[in-house]
Amino acid sequence: MSMVKKHIIISVAGFIVLAPLLLLHAPGGMAPPSLAAAEGFSSREMNGLIDRLMEETDGVKRQELVKLLRAYPEDEVGTRWLDLLDGAVRVSTTVRVIDGMAEFADRRFVPPLARLLVSPHYAIRKSAARTLKKTGDDRLYPVILGMVNSSNPVHRIYFIEAMNYLYDRRFYQSLTGLLRDDNKSIRIYVINCLKENRITESLGYIRAAAMNDGNDEVRIAAIEAIGDLRDGIGLGVLHATLNDENRDVRCESVRSIGRINSFASVNALSLRMAQEDENEIKELILDILAGLGRVGDVRGIERVLRTDAQQGLRIKAAHVLGFSASPLALAALRDGIGDTDFRVRAEVCNSLGNFRNRQSLAVLLDVLGKEDHVYVKSAALYSIRRINDRKSLVELFDFYTEEKDPIFRELLRTTIREYIGRYI
C-alpha cells in the first residue's frame, strides 16, 4: 500500500475518533451525533427519575430523587411534569403527578393546577391546593374570584375548600360574605374554614351566626367554632344558646363551654341543670363543674341526686355538691345517704368530708353505726379523718369494739391510733 493511501486510512480513522471534538467548532453550532445521543440518554434518565419519584413513598428517598432531578435543566423537568399532568387519566396518577410537581417551583405549573381546584375529585382538589400553596402566585387571584362568584354552589364550596390551604387576607371579605349565602352547606363550610385557619378577626361573624342563623346546623357549627377558638367573649352567646329549645344546640353549647373552661360559666351551667332533662347534657354539665371544682345554684344538681334514675348521674351529682358550702347542698347530701345504690352513698360520704363541720360529721358517724356495706363505711371513715375532730375519738372507739369485719376493724384501729397520737 502506498504512503498516500496509508495517510488517508489513518486520517479517516482519526476523523472517526476526533470528529466530536472537531465538530464542536463547526459553523452553525450544530451538535455532533455523539452529543445528541448523550443528550437523549440524559432525557431518558431524567424521565426515569421522575417516574421513580412518583412511585416512591419514603420521604428521605423522595428528597434524594428530587435532589438528583434538580441537576437537570429546570425547563426540561417542568415540561415533563406538565406533559404527565396533561396525560394523566386516573385520579391516583393525577395526584401523584401533582405531589411531584410540589417539589419544583416552576411558575408554569400555576395555571393548570389552578384549573384543578374545581375538579370533581376531592383528592385532586386537595393536592392541587397544597401544591399551589408552595408554588402559586397572583395568577391564582382571578381563578379564585371566579370560583367565589360562580352561580354554581359546588364551585363556591370548592373555593372555601381551597381557602383551607390558600387563605390570603385579600379573600377575607369574599369568604365572610358567603355567610349570607342561601345555601346552608356553604355557610357551614365558611365557618369551618374560618375556624381551621384560626381567623380570629371573624369571631364577630361567628357569634352572630351562632345566635341568629335560621338553620340550626349552621348555628351548631358556629357554636363549635366559638369553643374551638377559645373565644372567651363568646361565652355570653354560649350561655344564651345553652337554653335553646333544640337539644343538639344545647349539647354543643355545653361542649364549647367545656373547651373554654372558665369559672364565668359555673352559674349558667348550674342553673341549666334545674331545667335539663337530657341525660347526655346533664352528664356533660356535671363533668365540667367537677373539673372546675365549683358549683353555683345547687337546685338542679340536688334534683339529680334526689330523683334521677341514672345511678352514674347521681354519683356525679353527689361529687359536685361537695364543692358547695350551702345548706341546701348539705341537706341534699344528707338525704343522699339513703340512696339505694352503695356507690352513690359512698360518693355522698366523700363529699360530706368537704364540709368539715359538726353537721357533716354527725351524718358520717351515723353512717358508721347503720351502714352494712364496708365500701360505704370506708368512705365515711376517710371523710371523718379529713374533718379531723378530736371529739369523734370516743365514738370511733365504740365502733371499733363492735366491728365484725376484719378489714374495716383494722381501718378503725389505725384511725384511733392516729387520733391518740395526735390528741393524747
Image (cartoon, grey):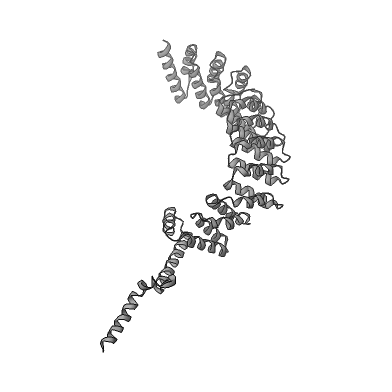
Residue 399 shows up from this direction: yes
Residue 342 in sight in this render: no
The quarter of the picture where the N terminus appears is: bottom left
User: Which quadrant of the view contains residue 196?
Assistant: top right
Q: Nearer the viewer, residue 128 or 248?
A: 128
Placement of 61 over or under 281, stated as above or below = below
Location of residue 262 by image quarter: top right
Farthest residue to the bottom: give it: 1
Rendered residue at 46%/18% (across/down): 400
Tell me residue 272's x, y (percent): 67, 28
> Which residue sits furthest top?
424
In-front residue for pair 129/305: 129
Image quadrant holding the C terminus, namely top left
Residue 351 screen position, x and y as percent: 55, 23
Residue 403 lies left or right of residue 16; in this view the side is: right
Depth check, front residue: 263 or 292: 263
Nearest the viewer among 76 and 304 is 76
Residue occupying the point 47% across, 12% down: 390
Q: Position of residue 217 (x, y in %)?
A: 69, 42
Q: Residue at x 58, y 32 (%)?
A: 260
Give coordinates of residue 364: x percent, y percent: 54, 19
Residue sitting at 29 percent across and 81 percent down? 10
**Number of marks in picture:** 0
Residue 309 is left or right of residue 408, and the answer is: right
Residue 28 left/right relative to 180: left
Residue at the limit of the structure toward the front, as seen here: 27
Task: Establish if 154 lies above or below 374.
Answer: below
In this rendering, is residue 12 above or below 103? below
